[in-house]
Every structure is written in C-alpha cells, then in structure tokens.
C-alpha cells in the first residue's frame, strides 16, 4: 500500500485502494496542509539527505500546537517510537507515529532555524524554517504568536553521554518517509530546511513532499 | 561571598560587601522577581530534594523569553555548562550560568506540570508550575500567550542511550543553589514544583528561595 515517489497532485484513486494528495515542498521552502482526524500524512525526503521541520496545529484553534516538551514528558523518551503519539501543549494526542522507512534519525531538541540564526552566521535575510512556517500558515490565513519547537524529521543530532549534541548530515535516502496518523483535525506544516551552512542537509537543500493519504 | 541560608528580606548590606534581596517561594507556589542586567540571581533549594521550574522573560517585552530549544541549539548541549548562557527565542543571552553548588542534575527536557498533567493523574485542580507561573506574572501585571519550556533546576532526568528518559528524585541538599548572571534586564520566575505524585520531589514539595545579589 506504500506509494513512495508516486505523484498525484490533485488527489485521486490509485488502484482503487488509496487516495493520495501530494504537496511538493520546494527545496528551502515550506508548505501547509489540512489533515482530518484519522487520515494519514506522510513526509517524504524526495532526493535523500534532507531535514524537514514539521509543525502541527489544532485545526479549530491553532494556538494549540504539537509540543516537543509535552511529548517528551508523556512518552518519557527523546523521540516517540512507532505507535506512540506526539501531543499538544494541552497534552492531547495530535499525530501518532505510524511508520518510518528511514534509518531512524530524527530530532526534537533543536530549534527551527530563524532570522537570528542566519544573522549569527553572517547571512542576514537567508530563508529559514521559522520564516517558512509563518509564510505557509499565512497562505491559510493563520498566524501564531511564537514558533514552536519543531519535529525535525531525518535530522541527525546524537546525544553523547556528556550531554553534548553533535550535528551530523542527514542519512535518509531518496524516497524515505515518515508517516503519521492525525489524532485530531490539524494543520501540518513542513519546511524543507534551507540550512546550507551547517552541514545538516549534506550537499545542500533539496525538495520534500507531503502526502495526505 | 556566598551567603547560603541567610535571609535578608528587605535587601541590605551584609558585611559591607554583598547586597541581597531574598524572596521566599513557599512549597508548591511560584514567585517572580525583577533582575537588572549584570545582577546575579540565585535559586536556593532550602531544605533539599526540591525541583524548581525557572522561567525568564525580557523585562521590556515579555514575549521574548528564555528558550530551552534555542539554548540547546546555541550551546550544542542538553544543558549549559558553568560560564555558558541561556538564550531567548531571539537567540539573545538572558541568563549566564555562573555557579552551581548542587550535585549538578538539572533538566531542560520536561514540560512544566500543568492542569492537564494533574487531570491525567486523576487530581484535577491540583496546583501546577504552569499555573504558578501565570499567577506570579499576574502579580507583576504581566501575562503570556504560552508557557515556555522551563529550566528545571535540581530535576534529575537522565537520558539513556536508547533515548529513554528516567524520572528520579532530586538529589540536591539543603542550601544547594544555582547562580545566574542576568545578561539583560529580565523577570525571573521560580515555581517550587508542587508535584507530589511522581516522586521527583522526594518526600514532597518544600520551599525554595530566590536571592537577587
């Protein structure tokens, strides 16, 4: 039933079994999709080696958002395992981790890159995941007060015993995907991280895709 | 120059060398203090074994707050070392970790306990660090849109290699203290965590103190 790499931009029935709507996320940009409760949403690393910053908001009140801190508290883990749920800042499940075809490195510790990050790197005005989030939500007529800590799919930040964090290049392969089931009606935003100075995206930013199944 | 356990509620000169204003934080409650740039603020575990949830906000615009995610990103550590700074969501230093007399366990992964946490534990209406934060800020005429991830001083949440988090009783001793230097004019809030069901506060909540030096 997995349809990695198949594009079906306008939605449609494939083989009479799965309806999929694909939203392409151009390299370095962000896109938002609405996902109804019970539907699945899949984040695809189209070419491999690309980090995606994923955010999720309650459809009926985007002040309620997926919270990394509350998810760590509820799961007692740095990152949920398949079958476990990401929860909101009100501790309500919003996305359940359903499947992962990647080697399994994901991060929930590092903040979204933002204008201040790139000013610090000497490149003011650089595209950022925080800016991409705001633009993608604005396309839906939504705005938020603060940028939540993202779920950084495919981002490889191992934690050493000393508490030191290492920043390594993503090791996801072309077509690798993480699939979630929506536990409530929600808006999911994915930014194909534009970071091209810190090495996390390997040779540079590439596109991603968001499939709503 | 360390004056652990000395109370000087109205501020004053002690030995002609150090001026200290102590704010007592009753067990299970929260208090806010203003700290001018360059002043030091010390969080004291008065009786030992007590977790404090610490929050900090820019005095001139409390929408800017100490951000655990940005601090991890800037320091590449789960928790800063002495001499390193906690930064805000705009990546500006707000508090520098200056000293720590405790055994050194602190947490920046777990969300503040909140009404939803205690509803889940079957005790709706229980005091919470999130509620204490809002009350302490309200005393100063301040309000916030969302509760930031706190700096949980003395909280012992070891990270296992598998990514599992363990919740252990605080091992701080009576009088143990963490000292910060304010890098900007800020409001610092400490909640003496009211958690009495999860074991993190040992035999139960006890008072803390905030000393502004």
Image (spheres, coloured by chain):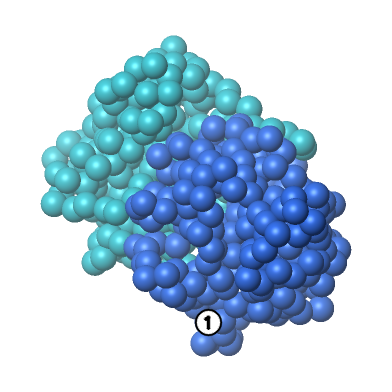
Chain colours: A cyan, B blue
Residue A101 position within the rendered picture, expressed as x and y whole percent measured from the top left = 50, 36
**Quarter of the image that includes the C terminus of chain B:** bottom right
Residue at image location 37% in from the left, 24% down from the top? A119
Residue B208 position within the rendered picture, expressed as x and y whole percent measured from the top left = 70, 70
In the image, taking residue A112 as reference, residue B197 lies left or right, namely: right
Q: Residue A185 appears in which quarter of the rendering?
A: bottom left
Q: Chain of mark 1?
A: B
Q: Nearer the viewer, residue B202 or A32?
A: B202
Residue on which disc 1 sits: B119
In the image, taking residue B158 as reference, residue B107 lies left or right, namely: left
Residue B142 position within the rendered picture, expressed as x and y whole percent measured from the top left = 37, 67
Residue at image location 49% in from the left, 22% down from the top? A200
Q: Nearer the viewer, residue A149 or B205?
A: B205
Residue A79 position within the rendered picture, expressed as x and y whole percent measured from the top left = 58, 48
Looking at the rendered structure, the secondary structure element under dot 1 is helix
Position of B127 relative to B85 (above/below): below
Residue at the far front in the pictured view: B16
Label 1 Cα crowd, 10 Å radius (few <14 / some 14-19 / many 20+): few
Q: Residue B122 appears in which quarter of the rendering?
A: bottom right
Q: Nearer the viewer, residue A5 or A160?
A: A160
Residue at image location 39% in from the left, 16% down from the top? A122
Position of A143 relative to A103 (above/below): below
In the image, taking residue A127 as reference, residue B34 lies left or right, namely: right
């Amino acid at each position: 039933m997995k349809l990695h790499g198949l594009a079906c931009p306008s939605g449609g029935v494939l083989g009479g079994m799965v309806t999929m709507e694909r939203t392409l996320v151009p390299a370095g940009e962000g896109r938002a999709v609405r996902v109804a409760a019970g539907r699945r949403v899949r984040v695809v690393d189209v070419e491999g080696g690309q980090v995606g910053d994923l955010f999720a908001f309650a459809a009926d009140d985007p002040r309620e958002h997926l919270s990394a801190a509350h998810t760590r508290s509820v799961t007692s883990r740095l990152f949920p395992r398949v079958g476990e749920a990401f929860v909101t800042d009100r501790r309500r499940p919003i996305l359940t981790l359903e499947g992962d075809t990647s080697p399994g490195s994901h991060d929930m510790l590092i903040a979204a890159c933002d204008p201040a990050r790139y000013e610090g790197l000497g490149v003011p005005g650089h595209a950022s995941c925080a800016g991409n989030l705001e633009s993608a939500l604005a396309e839906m007529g939504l705005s938020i007060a603060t940028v939540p800590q993202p779920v950084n799919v495919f981002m490889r930040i191992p934690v050493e015993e000393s508490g030191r964090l290492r920043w390594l290049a993503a090791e996801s392969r072309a077509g690798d995907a993480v699939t979630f089931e929506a536990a409530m009606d929600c808006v999911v935003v994915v930014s194909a991280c534009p970071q091209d100075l810190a090495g996390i995206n390997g040779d540079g930013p590439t596109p991603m895709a968001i499939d709503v199944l």
